Image (cartoon, rainbow, N blue to C red):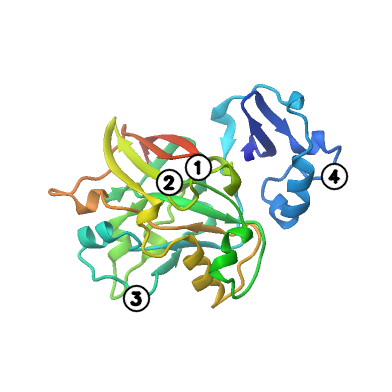
Amino acid sequence: MRIGNLAGRLVIVGSSGAIDVEQASEGRFASDPQAIYDRWDEFRQWAAQVPSSNATAYNPADLGAPAPRPRQLFAIGLNYRDHVAESGFGLPDQPPVFTKFMSAITGPFGEIAIPAGNVDWEVELVVVMGKGARDIDESQAWDHIAGVTAGQDISERITQSIGPAPQFSLGKSFPSFAPMGPWLVTPDELPARDDLALGCSVNGEKVQDSRTSFLMFNVPALLQRLSSVLPLLPGDVIFTGTPAGVGMGRMPPRFLATGDELVTYIEGVGEMRHRIVARQ
């Protein structure tokens, strides 16, 4: 199943169009895309019975982030060996964790507004929680996941590095720096949930190309680690890390510029397209 955020309304997305959940359920489920994660199991049982004849055509440009207001948004750093190498760090013993602030979230199409500085791309598999828990066992981790989507951990590298300690959360949380989409795909729909191709291109040039099987800390390991410290809540978002190919790691470094087109894809999920514009 694919669920989406269509102009702020929760929809089920199929090959023939989109089904408005509030209308199709006669008000049983609200139109708010974020609210559905608190009733995820109940919603999935209902959604399995909805006829596709209820679908109508839609404009993909109206799609927003499938989890637009998570209570917690985690991001993982240095989770692919080749990215660790290009960044000049040693291999971590535990996944480095930071956060991106909710105001950075935007949808899968449209514009990303960049400030002055060195703004970089980072394609990532994004996980959305469907069931909250503490101390999740790795063997049961996928049972807690509503689905996955594509994401970009857009990063302004100067702000990220200012001060005596890195400012990862600030440098990665300018408005529109957390695009997600185009929709959420449930794990049963994925060709191989732990081995998905992912990558991105800038102006048609492929700059990142990898697979999620190369994650050093895979999705179950991340859920185990995070939930050992704090409760994971329904609708929480986890950016799982980026592979090699970021602009900072190139010789010479290359960063996003006004007018660039950034295209992001994940196998079994789809693609996002963004035009880079100057922050006003």
Badge 1 crowding class, 10 Å Cα cut-off, few under 14, some 14 to 19, many 20 or more, is few
Tag 4 near tag 1, CB within 8 Å: no
| Residue 186 visible to the viewer | no
Q: Quick check: 230 above or below 111?
A: below
Kindly report which numbered mark, 2 or 4, lies closer to the viewer in this rendering: 2
Which amino acid type is shown beneath numbered disc 2? Leu
Which amino acid type is shown beneath numbered disc 4? Arg
Q: Is residue 202 left or right of residue 127?
A: left
Quarter-of-image position of residue 12: top right
Residue 10: percent from the left, percent from the top?
Answer: 69, 40
Q: CA distance from mark 4 to mark 1?
A: 31 Å
Q: CA distance from mark 3 to mark 1?
A: 30 Å
> Which badge, 4 or 3, is on the more N-terminal residue?
4
In this figure, which residue is indicated by the disc labeled 3?
Answer: 93
Which amino acid type is shown beneath numbered disc 1? Pro
For the point 56% across and 72% down, the residue is 227
In this figure, which residue is indicated by the disc labeled 4?
Answer: 28
Q: Secondary structure at mark 2?
A: loop
> Which badge, 4 or 1, is on the more N-terminal residue?
4
> Which badge, 1 or 2, is on the more N-terminal residue?
1
Q: CA distance from mark 2 to mark 3?
A: 24 Å
> Which badge, 3 or 1, is on the more N-terminal residue?
3
Residue 244: percent from the left, percent from the top?
Answer: 27, 52
Kindly report which numbered mark, 1 or 2, lies closer to the viewer in this rendering: 1
In this figure, which residue is indicated by the disc labeled 1?
Answer: 191
In this figure, which residue is indicated by the disc labeled 2?
Answer: 196
For the point 59% across and 71% down, the residue is 136
Q: Quick check: 115 above or below 17?
A: below
> Which badge, 2 or 4, is on the more N-terminal residue?
4
Badge 4 crowding class, 10 Å Cα cut-off, few under 14, some 14 to 19, many 20 or more, is few
| Residue 210 visible to the viewer | yes
